Amino acid sequence: MTAQAAAHDLSVIVPFHDKPEQLERCLAALRASTVPFELIAVDDASRGARAPELARAAADRVLTLERNSGPAVARNVGARHARGSLLVFIDADVVIERDTLARMQRELATDPTAAALFGSYDDDPAERSTVSYYRNLLHHWVHHQGPREASTFWAGCGAIRRAAFERVGGFDESYTRPSIEDIELGMRLKAAGERILLVPQVRCKHLKRWGLVDMVTTDVTRRAIPWTKLLLDRPGTGGDLNLQWKQKLCVALVLLALIALPACALSPELRALWAPLWGPLLLLAPVLVINRGLYALFLARRGPLFALAGIALHLLYFAYSGFAYAWVRLTHRRKHP
C-alpha cells in the first residue's frame, strides 16, 4: 500500500480498463516509489473482476465509472477526488522507475513558474516485437530531442499543478477514446500563458504490444486526423512536439518519392533519364540523413535487420501522416472561436 504524505502534496491518478497484467505491474512500480503519495485508481467500466481487485488492493481510493468513457473523463474524475496540490497522471500500461515521482517533485520545486512537466519512455521496451520496439524507441527519441520548454503535454507520465489544471478546466471530455486529449490540454495550458517542461530523465517503461494495423489505425484516426484539425482550428497555440520543420520536410519528401516511383517506372522520358528507383531513392536520401540519429539508435539496440525494419516503418509513418494531413486540409472546415 502507498504511504500517503500528511499534507497529500502528491496525488497519482491511474485510469484503467481491464488488462490486469499491465495494471498489476503499473501499481507495483508505483508502490516501490521513493516518496509518499496518494494513489487514486479510476476504473473506466472494466468488464472483468481481476483489474478492479488489484486496484482495490493497491490504491488509496478506487473510483468506478458506470460506462466506458475514455481516459479524459477518468482522469478528470480522479482529479476531482484528489487531495494533492500536484496531480500526476500515469497510464495503466506504464511502469515508472523508483525515482520518477521524486524527479517530478524536484523539477517543479526547482522551477516554481512551471505549471506542468512530462517525461519519456525508456529505450528498453517491455514488448520485443518489431513494431512495438520501433514504436517505443521512436517515442523515446522524439522526447529526448525535444526542447525543454514544451508546447504540448503527455498524460502517460506527466504532472500538472492542481491550480493550473483547474484554471484551464482539465481534460476535454469530448475525447471519449484514447486520442490527443493530453495534447489538447497542453495547448490550452500554453494559450493560458503556462509553462510546460519536457524532462526526459523522468522515465518509464511502456507495456503495450503494438501490431502494424493497430499502429497505423491509431496514428491516423486517433492522432494525425484530430491533431491536424486541432492545429488548423487553433493556429499558433503549440502542440507541435512531432512537427518540427525537419519532420515536415521528411513527410513531403516521402510523399514525393511515392509519386516519383510510378512516374519513373511508367514515363519513357523519366526512364531514359534514370532507372525507375533512382528518383525515389534520391528523394529519400535527405530523410535518412535527417533521421540518422534515430536510425543509429535502432542499429545500436537491435542490430542491422531491426534497423532496416525500423527505417521502413518510419518511412511508412511519414507517408500515412502526410496523407492524413492532406485529407484534413482538403476536407476540414475550420472552427472559429
Image: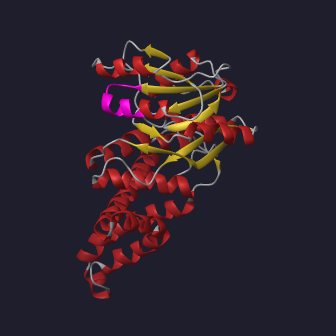
Residue 24 among those drawn in magenta: yes
- Residue at 60% x, 48% y is 199
The kind of secondary structure the magenta stretch mainly shows is: helix
The answer to whether any part of residue 337 appears in the image is no
Magenta span of residues: 16-26
Q: Residue furthest top?
A: 66
The answer to whether any part of residue 276 appears in the image is yes
- Residue at 27% x, 52% y is 129
Name the spot of residue 194 as percent of width and height, x first. Answer: 71, 37
Q: Is residue 205 left or right of 132 when viewed as pictured?
A: right
- Residue at 45% x, 35% y is 29
Name the spot of residue 146 as percent of width and height, x first. Answer: 58, 55
- Image quadrant assignment for residue 275: bottom left
Name the spot of residue 295 as percent of width and height, x first. Answer: 41, 67
- Residue at 45% x, 27% y is 71
Q: Nearer the viewer, residue 202 or 116?
A: 202
